[in-house]
Amino acid sequence: MDQEIDSRERNEPSKGNFYRMRKMFGQFISLIKGRIMESEEHLSDPKFILNGFLKGVLLWGIPLVVFARRKREIRRAIAIGLGVALVRFLSRLADKNQDISSYYYKNAVIGLIAGPIFLILDGNLHQNSVLVFWILIRAFYNVVPSIPLGSTIVMCLSASQLLSSWIFAPPTQLNKSFRSFLNWQGGQLVDDINFYQRFEPPGLNNACFLIHPDSSCGFYSIHFFLSGLYRALRLYLPLYGLLFITSQKKSIYHLLENLVRSCFFLSAYCTLGWASACVYYKIKPEISRKSLAMHTWISGLAVLLERPGRRSELAIYCLTYAMDSLYRWYKETYKESGFQLPTRLLLVLSGSILFHHHLNQPSFVMKWLLQLKD
């Protein structure tokens, strides 16, 4: 009877969570110390751990070293490999301990232990604000209840911030990589538009002259959408081709459907941003950062063209860069405040939440790379 009560207490997350988590944290540390003192032959699955290290190194290292030619990223690739190996090591230790393996917050504790060690292995990781916001937002998505059309609302709010920052704000208020992405997919020379905004008289209201000086609004929108499809195809074709090759269920129909929907989404996203300007500034003149935010939100509606399962991933992606843009704006505007995000703490806590909700995360990361279990 006592054993049955203890078993129920270990699996019940509603009573004494903090006490049991603290107790299991201590058990984990004791297990790690014991394993370190043991001989190598008793270590928990060395091949399984080594495989995780190699996957982590290759996952980060090959694309950046071979394609982007960033040799300095080798150090980070090694750190990621060691981090993956550490998570696998802790996971196997937990699975082999009867008390810990049935604990409800087992994976959360693994995240709390592995997180600080990983930040030590890669001392500069916490300085990447985009990564911090991405992990934080993914964790937030797992602890708040979903609302109808929530991803669409997030996409609209993010589009308002991102597109207005891209067109009107200083380049430093937008992530460099994302700004380059918009410069290509946006199909416009934003620097030329900013040139007119700086030197034309105040009260400029001829947005059409800036966007499409040699064509009508309708013809420009159709032409831009079609050319946007080609740009989107160049982006998505290699991505979906790689996913098709690595997937177990190879369906040509699903490949083509996903490719077409993603291309239509991205092209419509950019087209709506520019076409809405033609309509908005004829009703309410004067181009400003605020007025851009008032009409670029409509671009977010394009996410409805995507398949439902992908909408939340796109919302997380765009919201990450939108939050990063707001953070950059705040730091530039209120330099004297000295405010800094507690990035290390946010990374550790958010990672712990993601580990706890690992079934809701991309299977590529949690199953192929980390291989966490319930």
Image (spheres, grey):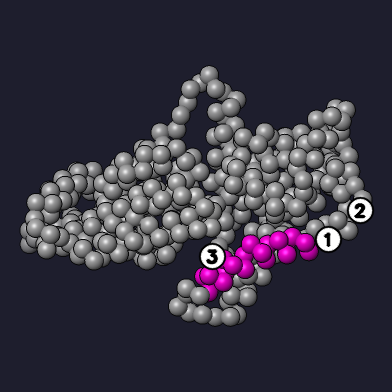
Instruction: Give the x, y percent position of residue 220.
Output: 86, 56
Q: Is mark 2 on a helix, strand or loop?
A: loop
Q: Earlier in the sequence, mark 1 or mark 3?
A: 1
Q: Give the residue drawn at x 80%, y 58%.
A: 224
Label 2 packing within 10 angstroms: few (<14), some (14-19), many (20+): few
Question: Visible in this render: residue 242?
Answer: yes
Magenta segment's dominant SS is: helix
From the image, state whether disc 3 or disc 2 is nearer to you.
2
One can see residue 23 in this view = no
Q: Residue 29 carries which label?
A: none
Seen from the viewer's position, the closer of residues 151 and 85 is 85
Q: Does 52 lie within the magenta span?
A: no
User: Image quadrant of residue 349?
Assistant: top left
Categorize mark 3 by other alpha carbons within 10 Å: few (<14), some (14-19), many (20+).
few
Closer-to-camera residue (81/196): 81
Q: Name the residue under label 1.
A: 223
Labelled pair 1, 2 in contact (Cβ < 8 Å): yes
Report crowding for label 1: few under 14, some 14 to 19, many 20 or more residues within 10 A (C-alpha). few
Q: Which amino acid does label 3 sit on?
A: Gly
Disc 2 target residue: 215
The stretch in magenta equals: 226-244
The CA distance from mark 1 to mark 3 is 30 Å
Q: Earlier in the sequence, mark 3 or mark 2?
A: 2
Judged from the image, the secondary structure of the residue bearing numbered disc 1 is helix
Q: Which residue is tagged 3?
A: 309
Residue shown at the point (62%, 68%) measured from the top left = 237
Q: Which residue is drawn at 40% across and 48% down?
A: 76
**Residue 108 in the image: above or below residue 263:** above
- 239 in magenta: yes
Q: Position of residue 371 (x, y in %)?
A: 32, 64
The numbered mark, 1 or 2, whose residue comes first in the sequence reads 2
